[in-house]
Each structure stands twice: as C-alpha cells, then as structure tokens.
Image (cartoon, rainbow, N blue to C red):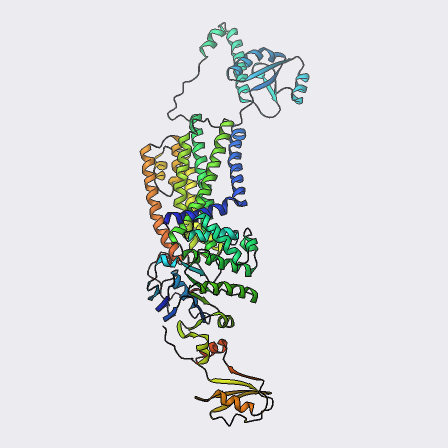
Amino acid sequence: MHAVLELSHLTKRYGQLEALRDLSFVVRPGEIFGFVGANGAGKTTTMRVVLGVLEADSGSVIWDGAPITFAARRRIGYIPEDRGLYPKMAVLAQLEYFAQLHGLKRAAAREASTALLERVGLADRGKSQLQSLSHGNQQRVQLAAALVFSPELLVLDEPFAGLDPVAVDSMTEVLRAEADAGKPVVLSSHQLDIVERICDRVGIINHGQMVAVGTVAELTERGPVRYWADAPGAGTGWYDSVPGTTLVEQDGSRWLVQLGDGTDDQAVLRAALATGPVREFRRDRPALTQLFRDVMSGTAVGEESDR
Amino acid sequence: MKRRSLIRVIATREFMARIRTRVFTITTVLTVIAIGGYILLQAYVFNKPTATALDVGFVGAAQSIAAPVRAEAGAAGETITVHLYTSAAAGKADLESGTLDALVSGSGAGTVMAVQSTVDPTLETALNDQSRQQVLSEYLTQHDLPPSAVLSQLAFSVGVNELSPVNAARIEQIVVGLLVAGVLYVSMVIYGQLVAAGVIEEKSNRIVEILLATVRPWQLMMGKIIGIGLIALIQVVLVAAVALVLASATKLVSIPTLSVDVVISGVVWFVLGYLMYALLFAAAGSMVSRQEDVSSVALPVIFVLVAGWILALTVAAPDPGSVGTTVLSFIPVFSPVIMPVRIAAGVAPFWQVAISVVLVIGTIVLFAAVAGRIYRNSVLRVGGRVKFSDALGLPPSVDRPAQRFS
C-alpha cells in the first residue's frame, strides 16, 4: 500500500495558546519528511493529532484520500516524544506484546519480534529487561516496537534524541529501508544536521504554523547565490571584471563572493583562474541550521505552497 | 481485531508481568501466614480448653470429701486423681514441686484449697458444694433429720430458656463470615491499589500514548483490571483453600459451617467487589502522573473500603440478622464485605442476595461509565493532578494552561 498522508488546515488551541494554526503539509510514499521547529512550536501536537491521541479543533488528517480512521491509525508505527516502553519487561516479550496489540497472532508476533530484534542488532538481548539496556539500545527497541507489526506509515517524534552518531546511522539505515519500501515517514528532530542529511523534504514549523516546506536543496538554494574561491594568487578586486559581484568575506586565500541575479558563475571562475591556480570553487549553501535561525529570527525564507 | 481479543492480550500481559514477581510471591505467602496464623491463634489461644485432668491432694480431715469432689468434677467432665496425705508438709512439698495441681486441707467451713496460681473453676465449684454439703449434713444429723432425704431434694438446677441462644455453631458462622469478608477486604485494598499503580506506571513512562494509538482507553483500562483481577483471584482461592484445610484440621470450625456455597459465594462477591472498586482505583490512578501522588486520589476510595470493613466488624458480626446489617448489605459499596457475613450466618434469604447482586452489578455498570470517562479524559494529561471537573469532561475551565502538549 502506497498512500499519501496529508494534513489539511489543522488548528488546535489550548486556552489562549494557539498550538496549531492552519497547518498543512503532505508526506508522500517513500519519502522521509523532517519536521523541525523550536520547542513548543507544535511538532508533538501535530504528531499526536495524526495518531489520534489528541483531537484537532478543526482541519483534517487525510490518509489514502480519505479522512483517517481508527483502523488506519492502528497501522501507524509511532515513537512518542517521551519514550514509552515497560522498563521491567523483557525486550522480546515487549515487542511481542505490541505485535499482538496490532492484531498478530501469538506465533506470528514471536516470529516478527525475533526478526526485528535481529534487524536492529539486539538479537542477543531478547530476554533482558528493557531497563538494563543502554539508552541507545532502548531506543533501538523503541524503533523495533514501532516496526514490529509492519506499519504502513511511520510517525517518529524525536527518534534521534540522545543517540550517538553510530546509533543515528544504524537507525537512519532502518528508516531509509522503510521509506524505500514505499512508506511515508514523518520525523521530528532538533538535530538539523541529521535532518539535512537524511530527510527528503523538510518542513519548518514556528508558533504552530508551517513557515517553509521543501527539499533541503530547495530550501537552501533560496538564499543569495554565493561561491567560495580558494585562489592564492588573487588580489583585492579580482572579481570586479564580472558584473554584479560583491565580496562577502575573505579568509586568507579564500574568498566568498556573492553573485547578482543573472551573473554567470563560470565567468567568476574564469576571473579567478586568471589570477593563478584555483584550489577550490564551490557553491556556498547555508546549512539548514542557518536557514532555521533565519526563520526563527523572522528573516522568513518565504512560504512555499504545499502540494 | 475484535475488541475482546485486544482486552485479552492486555490482560494477559498484566497477568504475566505480575504472576512471576517477588511481590506476588511475598504477598501470597504473607496473606496465607496471616490467615493461617489467625486460625491457629483462634484455635489454640483464645479457645484454649481448660485442663481436664487434675492431681488434687487431700490432707487429714479433708480426705472425707475427696470422693464426692471427684464424683462431682467427673460429672462436669473433669478427671481428678486423688492423692491422700497425712502430713500437710508432704502435701505442700508435692504442690510446690508441681506434682499436685491443688492441695485441700481442713473441713467444713474451714476447708482451704492451696494452688500454684490459678484456680480451676470446676474444682472450686465442686469443693464449695461438697464442703457445704458436709456442713449441712452434720447440721441435719444434729437435728435428727436424714441428710440424704433433704439433700436429694436439693439436687436440681434452675431451668434456663434462651430467647436467642448463642450456640457454638453460631459463633463459628460469624467467624467464617468475618474471615471471608476480611480476605475480600484486604484483597480489594491491595489489588485495587495495584490497579491504580499500574495505570500511573503507564502514564508516567508515556507508554499509554503508544497504547492509545492502538487500543481504545476503555479496552486498556478493562484489560488492566481483568489481568490484575485474575492474579487476585488466584490468591483469594489459595487463601480460601488454606483456610478451609487449617480450619477443619484444627476443628475451629466444622466443615458443614464453612460450606461449599459460603466459599463459592465468597469468590463471587470478591469478583463483584473487586470489579466495582478496581474501576474507581483505575479512574483515580489516571488523574495523577507520579506514583507519589497516588495516595491523594486513592484515599477516598480506600476510605469507603475501610468504612465497609469497620461496619462488618461492628455492626454485621455482632448481629448478622439485625435490621441494620440487612440494610447495610444492600448498599452496593458495602455489600461485598457485609453480605458474606450474613450468608455465612445463614440469615440471608436467596432473594435478598439476588437483589444485592443485581444492585452491585448495576453499580459496576455505572462506575464503568464514569471511570471510563475519567480515564479517557485524564490518562494523556501529564503534569499535576487532573482536576475532577476536567476528568469528568465537564465544560473546560477558562484558560487552562497547555500542560505538556508542545
């Protein structure tokens, strides 16, 4: 089943606080959608609305072309913001429990749990109590619990919180495989470098509103066009021959040059080569972090329409 | 997936998670020890039978009443071995060494009984009777009246008509009733609080959020109540079995009193009472987020349980047939501890039991609706204690801060 998840004009208020304001976005099959925003921006509220543990005041969650049902919600693999597993229960038994809750028969549940534990690299810890595992391993179990019943959609609230880079990589690998199998994957994270690396598309939420949606490339290309040139032989004003160029920053032999609208980057490269050897010439893309800061500080990147 | 099988999956987890724990083993052993200890205490301390065989010494003149004293005590069920002494000192020595239980000397109004510390009442009565008869016989003889003719006319006792006889069987019945009610009361308090703690556990580690994305709040609550209830039932049945065996072995109660239907009705009342109170405990637990706060919400429920038990001890036990007991046994929250006392005493007609069962079932349905509502409205709210009006889903109070919904 390759279905689209669509959030359409969601609003949610807590008293005076507007937690969600006309929030809309789409997650397509096979896509990892990264959901970023400051604390309290509305990420968790959004995910809880998708899961149905919280009801929106208005708007709708559309799954496979129709408003999502309880039965469809039971096909969502979910990792909540605060981890949710039984600390004193054995890992394997825990996975079996979740598999059974999602309708697997006992034998099938055992089989799926064993297979998944192997997949997240914890095959030898099946009998251990959850609380005896390290934080990273507990998180792997949490992921396994979300996947054990072969969900059709993944909703993961801060899945990388507190994980070391190796654990992040192994989790990313699993998520990528799930997405490649055609499932939409929605995740939220504070770790923008990770989001930038693994997400196909990113949505930035601020005060309950979606302020930017797009692929990482789309979002980062929207800023000014700047190039880094490492030209040891260059002197001040070497780029002046190309119209529309301005210097942004110089760091030893490295120059950051901003290009105006319609300026040919190849002309800039030729101007650099004219000064002698060029060791580096590359587009400067603002990191998602920079973009995120811009959004938060009000330097909006501009709204992109949702599809 | 069918709702019922989801509840079964949840109940199975609750059951398996607890049956193997040390807490279950320890509480089971402690409860069995408590009940067993109570029965043994009743049997051997409070109901301690008086000594039925005594060694009594008679010195000098006192020897003349030895035979009639032994005869009278024998009629009262006491065996007296008579030791005759000519020397008071020899008798005294035997009393001090413990060979004798009592030493009688003197005659008539001057009869004296020496004992170690406690006087056997049967012996004392016999001694009084016989020494008085001795005096009376001498007096009658002096006045030329035949003592045997006079004394034979005195050989009667006053007839007694008991309007409401307290017989041994009746006391047994009350003991049995209280035993059943007591086990039910203790189990409801312990397992009710376990339900509350279980709800809080899921709430505090946020697992409830994953669960509620899959199952309805109602299913989650019932699964927990049923799973823990099965554990409780095992313990109750175990305790009942131990009580039956011990009680019959010590002859504290005869098996007919502790009849099968008393035990079965006890189990039925446990199931009903547990369901009724577990619903309240589950609702109470859902309103707080930390185990430390459980007492603040569980206290009112425990208070009602304690009140029921106190009423069972003070009103029902002394007079199971009274109007007060009958009325109390129809109040649903008290029925599970009062009705077993009435049933064991044999004063609860079937139709009354049936009506109170129906009332309790009705209360369970009502509590289930209210508790389900409170649970649904509270269990996802973290932070402080959920306000009662919010928990019931009444129109929201103004400007409630967004707790932890970010």
The percent coordinates of residue B211 (x first, y second) are 43, 55
- Viewer-nearest residue: A29 or B14: A29
The percent coordinates of residue B129 (x first, y second) are 52, 16
In this rendering, the count of numbered labels is 0
Q: Left or right: where does residue B358 sit relative to residue B235?
A: left
Q: Is residue B181 above or below residue A9?
A: above
The percent coordinates of residue B164 (x first, y second) are 38, 26
Q: Is residue A90 above or below residue B33?
A: below
The percent coordinates of residue A24 (x first, y second) are 36, 70
Res B206 seen here? no
Q: Is residue B334 above or below residue A212?
A: above
- Viewer-nearest residue: B92 or A70: A70
The C terminus of chain A sits in image quarter: bottom left
- Viewer-nearest residue: A230 or B243: A230
The N terminus of chain A sits in image quarter: bottom left
Q: Left or right: where does residue B250 sit relative to residue A154?
A: right
Find residue A262 and report its image quarter.
Answer: bottom left
Query: Residue drawn at (51%, 89%), measured in percent from left and top?
Result: A268
Res A231 seen here? yes
Q: Left or right: where does residue A174 sit relative to residue B318?
A: right
Query: Residue drawn at (55%, 61%), measured in percent from left and top?
Result: A136
